[in-house]
Amino acid sequence: MLRSILTQSNFNHYYTFVVRQRSKETLESSLTPDFEDYLSGFWKIVNLQSRSSATASVHVDFLVSFRKAKSMNKRGILSKLRTLMSSTAHLTHPINAYIIPSADAHQSEYVAECDLRRAFISGFTGSDGTAIVTATEAALWTDGRYFLQAEQQLTADWTLMKAGLPDTPTDAKWLSTVLPVGGRVGCDPTLLSVEKWKPLSKELKSKGHELVCVEENLVDLLWSDRPDRPCNDLIILSEEETGSSWPQKVSDVRAKLAEEKASAIVLTALDEIAWLFNMRGSEIVFNPVFFSFVVITPETVHLFIDLRKATDKVQKHLSGVTFHSYDTVYKFISTLAENEAASKIWISNKSSYAIYSQIPKDKILLQSSPVAAMKSRKTPEEIKGMEQAQLKDAVALCEFFVWLEKTVPSGSVTEVSAADKAEFLRSQQENFVSLSFDTISSIGPDGAIIHYKPNSETDKRVTTDQIYLIDSGAQYREGTTDTTRTIHLGTPSQYEQECFTRVLKGHINLSTVIFPKGLKGHMLDTLARQCLWEVGLDYRHGTGHGVGAFLNVHEGPCGISFRFSPSEIGLEENMIVTDEPGYYEDGKFGIRIENCVKVVKAKTKYNFGGKDYLTFEPITVVPLQKKMIDASMLTEKEIKWLNNYHSKVRDIVGEELLKQGKKSVYQWLLQETEPLG
Amino acid sequence: MLRSILTQSNFNHYYTFVVRQRSKETLESSLTPDFEDYLSGFWKIVNLQSRSSATASVHVDFLVSFRKAKSMNKRGILSKLRTLMSSTAHLTHPINAYIIPSADAHQSEYVAECDLRRAFISGFTGSDGTAIVTATEAALWTDGRYFLQAEQQLTADWTLMKAGLPDTPTDAKWLSTVLPVGGRVGCDPTLLSVEKWKPLSKELKSKGHELVCVEENLVDLLWSDRPDRPCNDLIILSEEETGSSWPQKVSDVRAKLAEEKASAIVLTALDEIAWLFNMRGSEIVFNPVFFSFVVITPETVHLFIDLRKATDKVQKHLSGVTFHSYDTVYKFISTLAENEAASKIWISNKSSYAIYSQIPKDKILLQSSPVAAMKSRKTPEEIKGMEQAQLKDAVALCEFFVWLEKTVPSGSVTEVSAADKAEFLRSQQENFVSLSFDTISSIGPDGAIIHYKPNSETDKRVTTDQIYLIDSGAQYREGTTDTTRTIHLGTPSQYEQECFTRVLKGHINLSTVIFPKGLKGHMLDTLARQCLWEVGLDYRHGTGHGVGAFLNVHEGPCGISFRFSPSEIGLEENMIVTDEPGYYEDGKFGIRIENCVKVVKAKTKYNFGGKDYLTFEPITVVPLQKKMIDASMLTEKEIKWLNNYHSKVRDIVGEELLKQGKKSVYQWLLQETEPLG
């Protein structure tokens, strides 16, 4: 079945199906009529591009199709949902409001197509947002990245709630103004984490309302052609690639269990499970994960998975692990908790409320998963792989910039064709698996939309008189990349140079800071902004996030953000995070400079408190465009940093370019990495 | 009664009684035999110094007396406490552990003598610490500032728990290892805030134990000569001094009540009540507050206070306020909450659990007090007063440094005599009320003890071959001050200069930062450390705290710390905080540079997002010793800042010195404020 070999993208403007192990021809032959049927109603195929024999993509113009869908039947869907809410056909008691979160049962950032319930009901396709429907109202909360997109996508039936603005009520405050006394607010407990459910429930309770579990998902009842949950083949990584065997990792988890005197731990985050077992999947686009849950006790390991995936090879790799069917996890946990011998069952506060509610309160140990922290400290093998991935990415991006400089003046390059070119060039590198997120390819004003992803409706020509920003990355078998470069293909204005140079100063200030071991990245965020604030500029996003090793491009529990997160852990050697300050001017341009950096020991003259001090070392090796820099604004130290960086890029990438026989790109690199000043 | 006109200090090594409105002679005549009796058992009078006709101090050597007390009867006291814990004479059921917190019923940082229960039971006199006594164990938790002091003061009956160190268990974890199954842990609910009680209760519950309210305080039952709660005259401030009348402030609070649809708010923090009513007291040393509670409803204002304080003048000032006896507040709140019309009663999570437990859960609105935030934004009148106070303080400190430079070489100055001299000089300034905290006066290694306060046992000669640090401040009727200067009276070493200069660079980096309005100070803490981290140095305290206007020298809810506080609010114009980075080398020296700074609008070239940008302006006007600076380490911008600062100090303080006829000090100031470089 074609359906079973598809992996779905996130819903962001573009919809990409990556079809593996098929040639372009095979894929094209699959495209009628079943596939069209499958996409009917919502999806319109816009273009098809062959990447390689291993990968091909179908781009679906999501925005267009969704607009169409909205005008056709959105009002109908809301009214059907309201009927379900007020009847007891699927509910024990009617509810006054229904919450549709954007997450899946694993609280994934990106979700599979079958889990796009919030997008289905609201028409809003951004990666983050919560919809709430009452008898008379329908409201959608999303953050600053998506205000524009949500305004475009929501029909008049919906009220857009711009989360984070001072005048926007929280969901609970809003509910308390629209609900009748003693209102019942329903939600599918698998789709909301404990850390979100509990405060919401408490706040609603304090206003006289109640948050109740709705076991049967009401959106699913209305979604007649909802796709199946994907079930794809699994990839098994070797210990040479990961640096640690899964039994060793399980043993480390068990040591944590013993410390906490817990009798079991439940893992629900898909990237944690993939990391733990040294396996990868292809069930959520960009994220090489597979649908599963895990329970570890001091003696046993239980994997809950679509059993079709438990091939002989997988069973051999996971020798000793007990396999269970994916859906049986809830019952298994409740039985485990009923066991008198069970002391504490450890679950993360990022687990769903459905998991949480299987366990009596006095048997729950609710705290961050130890796997998240373990995974964030990369092994030497993972670091090596990440650096290899960066090198391939650098080759592809250097080729891309050469192509761009050559082709843009002819007027034939658009945001979409540039994104496709960058993807194609990456796909030519060995062990390319997929992109690690939708490419952000934006000219001029589009760059100011921080999470802009071009589509056929918004697509613009890339010109020589505006700033061009590309934020992109890939999954290679060796590792995951994420790089942003901002360039000008003509001559930037003095103001554009000033803004770029201030962003660069912030990037360098963060990249070179020396800090005590264990400091939370949160405390470093200001360093990347200080030079922008100086003249009254700022940017509305965090400065960095953790990056997985051939895993999710965004991972916790470390990062560099102005937002406080109680689950954030301190920075330690061998963690990998991004350093990506920016500046965005609405209607004009966007600037962002992003490297992945690894945390390394710093050599300091003193060592107060025997703490040990750390610093960052860039692992991204892509030149920064010197044309954008006003060198007179840089300090000597900053110029030295830039020249050292470029010298390293020249050495490492230069060698690889020559090895791959890309001589003209090598010539370009030599010129781009000439020292400044 | 002498007793009734005493105000008590905190218990830190030194014990200072400030006796108002009495000449030295009157005071001396009071000192026998009643006064000695009053101090008997614990206090030994060490010296008496006349400050002025308005103020005199009796220094009591607390450490000595407490040691004596400990050796005499501490074992006896613990055993008596254990007897109370195991009997039902004062308890409904016996308890297995008893917690003795250091706070009073208002969760004050400094407490009155009658509230020093933790010091009484343990012998440890630091301002922060929690004692827990079980049938067989007695343990005391305190933080890094007090490890040394606690080691000296605790007898072998006690285990010191060094809070914050990785191997130190939390109180709940420790209890779960020492308690029998189903342990009952008792605590006086008036002495623990809701925000501490609830998580402790929850954690204990998760380990199978229970936190229970012990209504009658068991320490009080053992403390036969426990002093009465002070009851001193109140000071009424004019609207010209405060910039706002109390009815206006009440009306602002009522607007917040309306926003939250709450039917009442309970105020328990003493500085919030003093601020609200434009009144000051003298019932806790250093803090010009008075014991009271307040309840505000949309129509009424209730003040709970020792009714002897409700003089005609006070009643006239508070016309319209209903007076109640101090102790009746709990009953009043529970009756109010029983009232069917009552919707929500707003209490701060810093209120005691006793307040919290008067109100049914569905009627509680538990969130930060709005008064804390209102109080932190100073009025123009308060700013003016604070600057006047700083000016007086600068005169006194300049005089002090002149005296120090002249007197130290003779060998006659000690840490204690220097502290006394600084206090005396301050007391000569008009409208001096008291110190705002115990003076930290330290030479060489003592400077490395961050909260060091000299006493007769630790007192050392101030010499010309070590670094001298003085951190001191005062209450004037106009405002509150807090200044730290670090100097060398001989020639500092190159290393000492390097450390001082790095601290200075951090101080300047923070002082000059431009940041968006509403940013939490938390996000600025790193700026003060960056230059120390660069060479592997750091300091173990926050960088700044809010300062009250003729109120507590430490106030929330804004500050500049690496510790995250959920109640912290963003920085706004007219807030006043300190900027006080440092560096401390155990056994060698301590360096700290502290100014009070006000938050002012910054002029920026751009104004991204229309946010408005802010910066700091020093209001402390005391020269920094240039001898300590290695000018070669400063950037041009830093030298410019220093020279501008000194030029301002010269202008403002110079004029005042001349006005006060202090010509030789003026000459010194001219020299100290000569530009660098």
Image: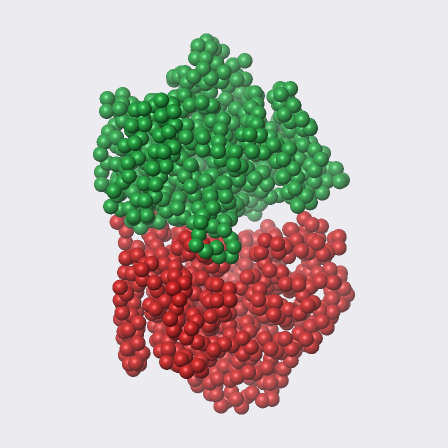
Chain colours: A green, B red
**Where A422 falls versus A502 (above or below)?**
above
Q: Nearer the viewer, residue A395 or B235?
A: A395
**Where A588 falls versus A1 (above or below)?**
below
* Residue B653 found in image quarter: bottom left
| Residue at image coords 26%, 49% | B605
Left or right: where B75 falls relative to A601: right
Q: Nearer the viewer, residue B276 or A333?
A: A333
| Residue at image coords 39%, 68% | B492
Q: Nearer the viewer, residue A75 or B464?
A: B464
Left or right: where A537 falls relative to B546: left
* Residue B83 found in image quarter: bottom right
**Where A296 falls versus B346 (above or below)?**
above
Image quarter where the N terminus of chain A lies is top right
Residue A608 visible, this orientation: yes
Task: Residue B309 in the image: state x and y as whole percent.
Answer: 52, 76
| Residue at image coords 54%, 30% | A241
Image quarter where the C terminus of chain A lies is top left
Task: Residue B500 in the image: state x and y as whole percent.
Answer: 39, 63
Task: Residue B231 in the image: state x and y as whole percent.
Answer: 54, 76
How many numbered marks does the figure carry?
A: 0
